[in-house]
Amino acid sequence: MKMDLEFLSQRLQCSRTDRMECLPIVRQLMELATNAHDFGLLDLDKRIHKDSIKFSDPFLRKAVSCIVDINSSDLVRQVLYNYIASGNYTGAQFLKNVVIAETVLAIQRDEDHDHIFSFLVPSLFGLDFESNVAELYKEYKQFRGVAVPAAETEPKKEIN
């Protein structure tokens, strides 16, 4: 099934509360992206299936299995969006699954983490919420001991 912008916009109508509910999965995806970069996709698959309590989301588990088992990111995208469409999700659940799908696809392509978590993932939350995702990524980098440039630690100016 092909996802078009109209389909996405109809289901991606999320409240601030819906978006807040999705932040924990973003944090997990940050950990998984780091793990995949450091140890490879096969180790990522082992890790997510070994800790079924921490990684309990069934769509996340399916998405990780797909990026390990299917070489083509186009085919992975098709499979994941078929699951999303057939689940008829809306709101927070739809957003969460799209965030998972797009992030694991970026992980499979070995995209730069700064690109994934500073641009790609925040774009899925919208302009009015991107600073929340950026703050989460900044905190994650600081937790890992990664130097955060001064521009990332300064408060963002409001756009009028």
Image (cartoon, grey):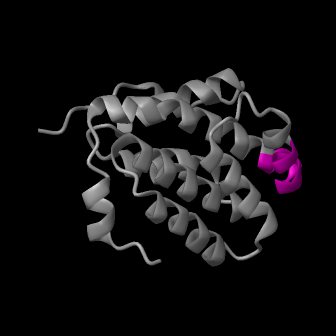
From the viewer's perspective, tell me whether residue 2 is left or right of residue 106: left
In this rendering, the answer to whether 134 lies above or below 96 is above
Say which quarter of the image contains residue 132: top left
Q: Quarter-wise, where is residue 72 in the image?
A: bottom right
- Is 114 one of the magenta-colored residues? no
Q: Is residue 150 left or right of residue 17?
A: right
Q: How many marks?
A: 0
Looking at the rendering, the stretch of residues picked out in magenta corresponds to: 36-46
Residue ID at (52%, 69%): 82
Residue that appears at 54% across and 58% down = 102
In front of the other: 145 or 89: 89
Residue 19 in percent (x, y) is at: 37, 35
Q: Quadrant of residue 151?
A: top left
Residue 139 is at least partly visible in this image: yes
The answer to which of 57 and 148 lies nearer the viewer is 57
Q: Main secondary structure of the magenta part?
A: helix
Relative to 103, residue 58 above or below: above
Residue 151 can be seen, yes or no:
no
Residue 110, horizontal then vertical, whole percent = 71, 60
Percent coordinates x, y for residue 33 in the rendering: 70, 46
| Residue 97 image position (x, y, % from top left) | 50, 50
- Which residue is more in the foreground, 50 or 128? 50
Q: Which residue occupies 56% across, 36% down?
A: 25
- The front one of 34 and 104 is 104
Q: Residue at x 61, y 49 (%)?
A: 59
